[in-house]
Amino acid sequence: MTGLLLLIPVALGLGLLGLLAFIWCLRNAQYDDLEGAANRILLDESAPPPPPGVRQAVAEASPDPR
């Protein structure tokens, strides 16, 4: 019986903590775009081209193809 005096408040506290975490997720738009991440991993996006300085350095470092 004394165990229930400890377990009931602990269970209620954990339930309240879970409810607060769920409300926080809703308010911070965590559930707004559920399919975006799933689709984003499937779509091929080309990488942006390197800056001109990098292209020039790579061209100078590579041997002449002739």
Image (cartoon, rainbow, N blue to C red):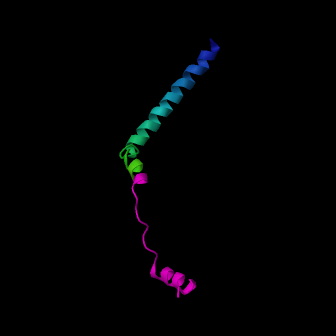
At horizontal 41% and vertical 50% (from top left) the residue drawn is 37
Residue 15: % across, % down: 49, 28
Q: Is residue 58 above or below residue 10?
A: below
- With 8 as the anchor, is 28 left or right in this view? left
Q: Position of residue 44 (x, y in %)?
A: 40, 59
Residue that appears at 53% across and 83% down: 57
| Residue furthest out toward the left | 32
Give the residue at x 57% y 85%: 63
56 up-or-down from 30: above or below:
below
The number of numbered discs placed on residues in the rendered structure image is 0
- Based on the picture, tell me whether residue 51 belongs to the magenta stretch: yes
| Nearer the observer, 30 or 8 | 30
Q: In which quarter of the image is the N terminus?
A: top right
Residue 27: image x %, image y %? 38, 43
Q: Does the segment drawn in magenta span residue 14?
A: no
Range shown magenta: 40-66
| Residue furthest to the top | 1
Query: Residue placed at 41% from the left, 45% from the top?
Result: 30
| Residue extending furthest toward the front | 66
Q: Which of 59 and 2 is in front in this view?
A: 59
Q: Nearer the viewer, residue 23 or 45?
A: 45
Does 29 sit above or below residue 6? Answer: below
Q: Is residue 43 left or right of residue 13?
A: left
Query: In the displayed image of the protein, which residue is found farthest to the right?
Result: 2
